[in-house]
Image (cartoon, rainbow, N blue to C red):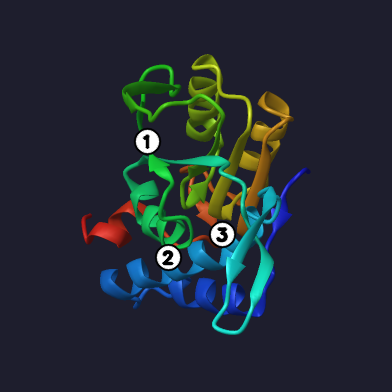
Amino acid sequence: MQVQVMNHPLIQHKVTLMRQKETGSKDFRNLLEEITMLMGYEITRDLPLEDVVIETPIAKMTGKQISGKKMGIVPVLRAGLGMVQGMLNLVPTAKVGHIGLYRDPQTLEPVEYYCKLPDVVDRDFIIVDPMLATGGSASAAITLLKNKGIENIKLMCLVAAPEGVQRINKDHPDVRIYVAALDDKLNEHGYIVPGLGDAGDRIFGTK
């Protein structure tokens, strides 16, 4: 499977806190934002740099700055919204799009009900969604971006099941997947095991 599991001790510690059923919505949201920031350091590792001449209080020097590469963050509604602020804390100039999908009760395939994206020219996109379960919604979101002419896409999730990773690897072998945890399997209801429950419900306090 082609997936990068981020095993930094801080990430692993915070994921464990999120998994606990007694963790409330406020702490769950805060932890998700913190983990997203920690993962963001790694996912932005390949941003190109350019030289810039500046003056410190002591002397003139040549430093480095990100070379104007444009970034787009695209949460898959609704749970993906919980990861947006963490990325914006790192890259405040990033633009944010939104993709809404629901599962057709007959075919069980994802159906698009909302898509609003920033200007896609020369922009790299990161799709964010806490859970990668069957991979159906993530694959559909990636296809949607590709159909808009977007080529450089990364997928960033908190917890993934092997089935979801395999689905993305099969449908979109060019898309790199970043996760904080790769869990055991999906159960008969399509939930990740051991997982952390329904991320959207836990973020927003719904049932």
Query: Callout 1: helix, strand or loop?
Result: loop
Q: Residue at x 60, y 74 (%)?
A: 12
Q: The C terminus lies in which quarter of the figure?
A: bottom left
Residue type, mark 2 in image: Leu
Furthest toward the left, the residue is: 206
Residue type, mark 1 in image: Gly
Q: Earlier in the sequence, mark 2 or mark 1?
A: 2
Q: Earlier in the sequence, mark 2 or mark 3?
A: 2
| Residue behind mark 3 | 40
Number of numbered callouts drawn: 3
Q: Residues within 10 Å of mark 1 (few under 14, many from 20)?
A: some
Query: Callout 2: helix, strand or loop?
Result: helix
Q: Residue at x 47, y 52 (%)?
A: 130
Residue type, mark 3 in image: Gly
Picture coordinates of residue 106 (x, y %)? 37, 18
Q: Is residue 153 visible?
A: yes
- Asked whether, in this view, residue 152 is left or right of residue 98, the answer is right
| Residue behind mark 2 | 32
Q: Is residue 104 visible?
A: no
Q: Earlier in the sequence, mark 3 or mark 1?
A: 3
Picture coordinates of residue 32 (x, y %)? 42, 65
State the residue in front, 97 or 139. Answer: 97
- Quadrant of the rendered structure where residue 119 is? top left
Alpha carbon separation for disc pair 2 and 1: 19 Å
- Quadrant of the rendered structure where residue 193 is? bottom right
Q: Residues within 10 Å of mark 2 (few under 14, many from 20)?
A: many
Q: Residue at x 39, y 41 (%)?
A: 95
Alpha carbon separation for disc pair 3 and 1: 17 Å
Picture coordinates of residue 48 (x, y %)? 69, 48
| Residue behind mark 1 | 97
Q: The N terminus lies in which quarter of the figure?
A: top right
